[in-house]
Image: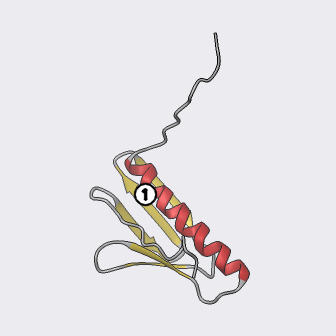
């Protein structure tokens, strides 16, 4: 299994996750984001409220989509809670 894909996605308080068929919608204090899952990848909510991403087999394409989908959904949860932040480091003179 993918090292990234097998990690559960924790859902903090104040964040609502709706899974309707192939569509995942995440809404929180900073907005709402949605993503359509690839046909072979499934996502489900565990008993403790976390999300897990599953794939049907170990084919190359499914392995790639497994980790990608998990990362995208985790970034959606981060985006609606913390938002986007860009830190710049100035190096040089002047």
Position above or below: 17 against 59: above
* 7 up-or-down from 31: above or below: below
Q: How is the image coloured?
A: secondary structure
What is the total number of numbered labels drawn onto the structure image? 1
- The local crowd at label 1, few if under 14, some if 14 to 19, many if 20 or more residues have their Cα within 10 Å, is many
Judge by depth and name the residue closer to the eye, 10 or 80.
10
Q: In the image, residue 21 lies at what x, y percent?
A: 50, 77
Depicted 34 relative to depicted 63: above or below: above
Quadrant location of residue 47? bottom left
Instruction: Name which quarter of the figure residue 65 lies in.
Output: bottom right
Q: Secondary structure at mark 1?
A: helix
In this rendering, position of residue 62 left or right of residue 3:
right
What residue does disc 1 label?
A: 77
Query: Looking at the rendering, in which quadrant would you find the N terminus?
Result: bottom right
| Residue drawn 59% across the image and 23% down it | 90
What percent of the width, then of the height, locates residue 48? 28, 76
Q: Residue 49's x, y, as percent?
A: 31, 72
Q: Residue at x 42, y 72 (%)?
A: 8
Quarter of the image for residue 18 reads bottom left
Which residue is farthest top?
94
Residue for point 45% across, 50% down: 79
Quadrant occupied by the C terminus:
top right
**Residue 26 at what x, y percent from top left?**
42, 60
For residue 36, above or below residue 40:
above
> Looking at the image, which is closer to me, 13 or 87?
87
């Amino acid at each position: 299994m993918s090292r990234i894909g097998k990690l559960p996605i924790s859902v903090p308080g104040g964040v609502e996750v709706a899974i309707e068929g192939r569509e995942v919608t995440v809404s929180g204090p900073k907005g709402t984001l949605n993503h359509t899952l690839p046909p072979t990848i499934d996502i489900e909510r565990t008993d403790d409220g976390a999300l897990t991403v599953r794939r049907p087999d170990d084919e190359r394409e499914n392995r790639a989509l497994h980790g990608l989908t998990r990362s995208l959904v985790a970034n959606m949860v981060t985006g609606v809670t913390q938002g986007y932040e860009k830190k710049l480091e100035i190096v040089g003179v002047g």
